[in-house]
Amino acid sequence: MSDRTFGGGLWASWAGFITLLLVWQIISVTKLINPAIFPGPAGVVEAAVRDVPLNRLLQHIGISLFRVATGFSIGAAAGIMIGIASGWYYRLGSILRTPIELIRPIPPLAWIPIAIIWLGLGEPSKVLIIFLGAFFPVVTNTYKGMVNIDPNVIRAAQILGLKGRQLLLRVAVPASLPDIATGMRIGWSYSFGCMVAAELIAAKSGLGYLIMNARQTGQVAVIVYGVILIGVINLVTDFLIQEVVIKRKLRWQYSAAS
């Protein structure tokens, strides 16, 4: 497991982000694109400071993060449990894989009308959409990790006397952790996209609502600011997941590969 597996360090990501800002500012200064349609970084920051008070912005960020964390936590937990069970118990897996593969290709956004009809315009419908965005990447990668465990590892553990639940929890699950970690990172990013979509359609708060409200009032700079802010938050939280959670839990594999 190399640094490339985790997408490089945070500094490299920020270097790319700063380069993007410089190119963006050059395009704005040279007026290659009409600033009224796509304002430059300076104009975006100025409009954001003027039109979006800090306390209001922090409130939108907190609400969106709470929604993502709630839907992702439920979706990831369900995906890990079902993925482990279906990958370890063959008969259960043969039963569950068909409905999962049937529903998995359906975009979570397609469920928004049904979620609103079933659960209304409140928080449960948004959490459901985020749940769907997190669940399928996690369950798919967890199942993949379980079925691709080296048979020699299982045989060696059985020779040492491990069987049943001990074999599952002490050997199979740890061996599948890299795939589970990959599914969690993908699920987290998908959760962010689903959160924005859900808030764009039916919300009175959150970053998606901030963008939609700015569109209705013609505040292009605020729209761009909201989009960039979502990207930055996703970048930082993804880094925290990989550095603080994944690398610490898989430090034994990471150190061996390095």
Image (spheres, rainbow, N blue to C red):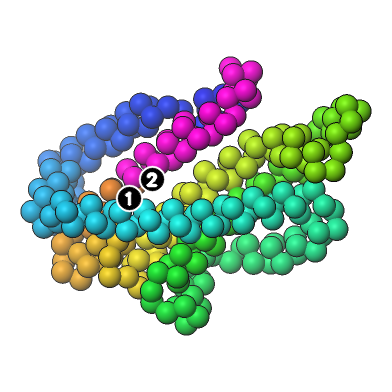
The residue located at (82%, 52%) in the rendering is 89
The x, y position of residue 135, in whole percent, is 58, 57
Q: Nearer the viewer, residue 66 or 97?
A: 66
- What whole-number distance in Å separates the C-alpha atoms at marks 1 and 2? 6 Å
The reply to whether dot 1 and dot 2 touch (C-beta < 8 Å) is: yes
The answer to whether residue 51 is seen in the rendering is yes
Q: Residue furthest bottom?
A: 117
The x, y position of residue 85, in whole percent, is 75, 52
Give the image quarter of residue 156.
top right
The amino acid beneath tag 1 is: Ile
Mark 1, secondary structure of its residue: helix
**Residue 230: assigned label:** 1
Please tell me how many numbered marks the rendered image carries: 2
The residue located at (40%, 69%) in the rendering is 123
250 drawn magenta? yes
The x, y position of residue 204, in whole percent, is 28, 70
Magenta segment boundaries in residue numbering: 232-258
Left or right placement of residue 89 versus residue 12 in this view = right
Q: Nearer the viewer, residue 215 or 242?
A: 242
173 drawn magenta? no
Q: Nearer the viewer, residue 190 or 64?
A: 64
Q: Is residue 3 above or below residue 223?
A: above
**Residue 234: assigned label:** 2
Left or right placement of residue 249 versus residue 49 in this view = right
